[in-house]
Image: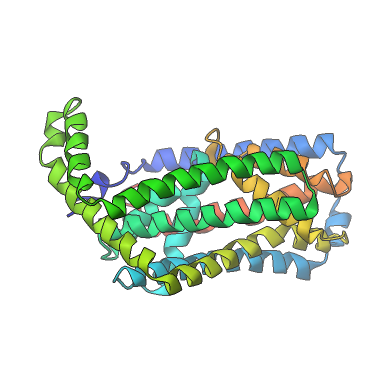
Amino acid sequence: MYVEAENKISQQPSKKSIRRKAILGILISAVAIVIIFHFTETKVTWKAILRANVYYLILAFLLQFLFWMFWAVRIQYLTHYVGKKISLKYAFEVTLASGFLAAITPSSAGGEPIRVKMLYDAGVGAGESTAVVLVERILDAIFFTVALPVFVMFTGFSIKLGMEISCIFGFSLFMFLVFLWILLKKPDRLENLSYKLEKLVGRFSKRRSEGLAEKLKEELTAFREALAILAKNSKCALISLCVTVMIWMPEFLIPSAILAAFGCKPYFLYSITAQLLLIVISLLPLTPGASGIAEFGMSYLYSKFIPQHIIGILTALWRVMTYYLNILAGFFVIKRKYVDEI
């Protein structure tokens, strides 16, 4: 069962590659912010910055910390329900490491593999680790699919764009849930799937395909069993959904805290709606951590309801709290745990 981590997840990038991607993401983000400052006529002076309410800026940082903490709580809770135990401290490290790799890969694709690897390193089986991470994705998808149309209709904000994105997101979630249902209800198909994958891999590399079917069958079986445990426990599902809401709401309130710091109206409902749209838009696999996409998307959406002169500073501080902090905190975890590997 899952003899080597690299057979389960993509090969770990080199230390040089990680550094290059992190720098690229930061540079794209910084250039985008400079452009936004220029076109929104933002006048930033030290005097204006020093007038900001420091308590609201501290609140913004604490909201980011709560985002990390509740994510760690969810990882620990789901891991417990597949029969394994990890400490909250370790789950917090998994969260930070995931945030780092998500910040330097398109569509945040690097976040899931490192979570699988770190859970496996902590003694959680590969199938169970994959199930935990997949269930996290499903919980997030359910939250966004429900919350986005509700907030869009309630606020009337960018209603056409919001509803179209929500419908596409909902359809994708539905098809994925159908696949999972087939996997749970028809376990006999696991063996057929395993051997088909072995044949497919064998066309490219006979050496890599040897014994692959049995390994895949073993992992898929463990994966199915872990999903079944979670699916049959309604209490676990309800608690996990509640924690998912608790994960994302602090993150979505960060822009409101920054606005309040500069004496602006926080626009809670509009800001949350804009953040929901930004999360979905940021899934476009174009730049590391959606750098550039997030900044321009932020400035466009928030220009609908906040004064133009504050857009630049809001975008800059928001990215500091939600992007640069992820890179900084996650880098130290990755460096300490996998310095020899990356």
Q: Is residue 260 left or right of residue 250?
A: right
The one nearer the camera, 73 or 337, is: 73
Q: Is residue 59 above or below residue 295?
A: below
Q: Is residue 212 above or below residue 148?
A: above
Residue 200: which quarter of the image?
top left
Image quarter (top left, top right, bottom left or bottom right) of the N terminus: bottom left
Q: Is residue 272 left or right of residue 216?
A: right
Residue 54, image x, y percentages: 78, 67
Counting labels gives: 0
Which residue reaches farthest top? 203
Residue 168, image x, y percentages: 57, 40
The one nearer the camera, 35 or 252, is: 252
Q: Is residue 127 left or right of residue 298?
A: left
The one nearer the camera, 37 or 10, is: 10
Q: Residue at x 77, y 55 (%)?
A: 154
Which residue reaches farthest front? 185
Residue 112 appears anywhere in the view: yes
Residue 331 appears anywhere in the view: no
Residue 112, image x, y percentages: 41, 51
